[in-house]
Image: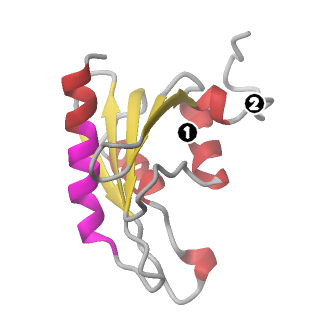
Amino acid sequence: MDQKLKETLIRTASKARHKARVYTGFHVGAALLTKTGEIFTGCNVELHTTLSSICAERTAIVKAVSEGYTEFEAIAVVSDSPKAISPCSFCRQYLIDFDPDILVIMSNEEMTDVVEMTVRELVPMAFVGSGRKQKS
C-alpha cells in the first residue's frame, strides 16, 4: 500500500471522529479499506451503559459487512489524543476474526505519530476460531 493511500485513510478516519457521540469526550474515527478498494468509516458511539457502546473500528466493520464486504486490507484509527492509540481488545478480536494480516494504521490527527502493524502483531497468540486457517 502506498503512502498516499495511507494518508487518505488517516485523513478519512480523522474526519469520521467528528461524528462520534461521546460522554467521555474522547472522539475516535476509523477508516476501513476493503480488498476491492472501498472505504468504510466509523466513529465511536457511547451510551450511558458502557457495555452497549461501540468503538469506531467495529462501527466501520459492521457497516462494511452490512454492505456485503468481508475482506479487508487495512484500517486507520485516529483519536483526539496527541499520540497514536491502538484498537481495544474487543476491536482487535473483531479484526483478527476477519484476517490477522489486516494492516492497522494508528495515528494522531497531525500524522506526527503514526504506528503501523498487522492485527497479528497487535494480538500475539490470538484466538482464531476453527473456521479460519491460522498462518504461521
Residue 102 position, x and y percent, is: 49, 27
Residue 69 position, x and y percent, is: 35, 34
Judging by the rendered image, the residue that carries numbered circle 1 is: 95
Label 1, residues with CA under 10 Å away: few <14, some 14-19, many ≥20: many
Q: Which mark is residue 124?
A: 2
Label 2, residues with CA under 10 Å away: few <14, some 14-19, many ≥20: few
Residue 60 as seen in the image, left or right of residue 118: left
Pick whichever, 102 or 26, lies toward us.
26
16 magenta-colored? yes
- Please report whichever mark, 1 or 2, sits nearer to the chain's N-terminal start: 1
Q: Secondary structure at mark 1?
A: helix
Residue drawn at 30 percent across, 43 percent down: 111
Residue type indicated by callout 2: Pro
Query: Is most of the magenta stretch helix, strand or loop?
Result: helix
Q: Which residues are magenta?
A: 9-20
Residue drawn at 78 percent across, 35 percent down: 127
